[in-house]
Amino acid sequence: MRALVVTTLVAGMALSGCTTNPYTGEQQVSKGVKYGGGAALLGAAIGAATGKNASDRRARALKGGAILGVLGGGVGVYMDVQEKKLREQMQGTGVDVQRNPETGAVDLIMPGNITFATARSDINPSFAGTLSQLAQTLSTYNTQTISVRGYTDNVGAASYNQQLSQDRANSVANYLIRQGVPASRVQASGYGMSNPIADNSSEQGRSQNRRVEISVNPPASVPGQG
């Protein structure tokens, strides 16, 4: 009975949450429903486990799943809207916008060919306008933390690259802060030459690895709900 309640609840959410991906044209379950489905499972499981009898367990499962499902779905939809906004905003800038399937964060990958010259941590002037636009969006959706990660290619000593990557992350973070994003929301970290995303044997690959990544992390709750 407990399993049936949970399965029925989440299946109903999935059927009602199928959407067309605006980028691929394929049918899919929206990310908001994925958040809500996971939360509904948790709420339903808690309710089913705490009921006094079969009837009470069913009622508690439905109530717990509904409450947490709505809240979880709200976070997912909130992130969906931001992802769409950021994709539109970054179109044609060279910034790659991705949705992290594990964390739900919106990740922005900014390669060195548009952000930094070799061995430099000062932002290319031509990229400042893009960062200013990004700062406006981050200020509008102002409930989340922002993780800024700096990386380098594999040219030079590891200790040098570690410091350079930190300097690059700091440059981007400080620029966003100067544009109005609260410093308390921004964390900058350097990762040196680790986690390459391209082959370091070519200049093209090195310029991709010489990058900064920004993660717009999901909030604990949607504004007005928590």
Image: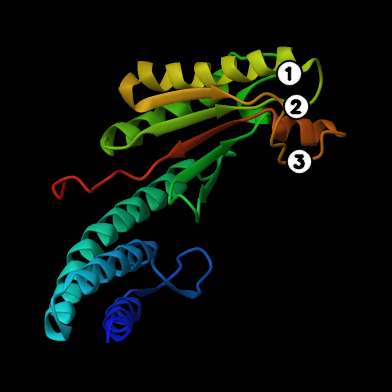
The location of residue 49, given as percent across then percent down, is 24, 71
Q: Residues within 10 Å of mark 2 (few under 14, many from 20)?
A: many
Q: Nearer the viewer, residue 68 or 33?
A: 68
Classed neighbour count for the residue bearing mark 3: other residues with Cα under 10 Å, few (<14), some (14–19), many (≥20)? some
Write down the residue under mark 3.
198
Q: Which of the two discs, 3 and 1, sits closer to the camera?
A: 3
- Residue 75 in view, yes or no: yes
How far apart in space, not on screen, are marks 1 and 2 (Cα)?
Answer: 9 Å
Residue 124 appears in the picture as rendered: no
Question: 57 or 124, which is in the foreground?
Answer: 57
Q: Residue at x 39, y 62 (%)?
A: 31
| Mark closest to the chain's N terminus, 3 or 1 | 1
> Tag 2 or tag 3, which sits nearer the N-term?
2
Between the C-alphas of marks 3 and 1, the distance is 16 Å
Q: Residue at x 51, y 17 (%)?
A: 170
Which callout, 1 or 2, points at the residue further toward the start of the chain?
Answer: 1
State the SS at label 2: loop
The residue lying toward the viewer, choosing from 63 and 104, is 63
Residue 16 drawn at (x, y percent): 30, 79
Label 3 – label 2 distance at C-alpha? 9 Å
Q: Amino acid at mark 2?
A: Asp
The answer to whether the residue labelled 1 contacts the one labelled 2, judged by CB atoms less than 8 Å apart, is yes
For mark 3, give the secondary structure. Answer: loop
Task: Please name the residue that numbered disc 2 is placed on.
Answer: 153
In the displayed structure, would residue 159 be above or below residue 129? above
**Quarter of the rendering containing residue 41:** bottom left
Circle 1 is placed at which residue position? 118
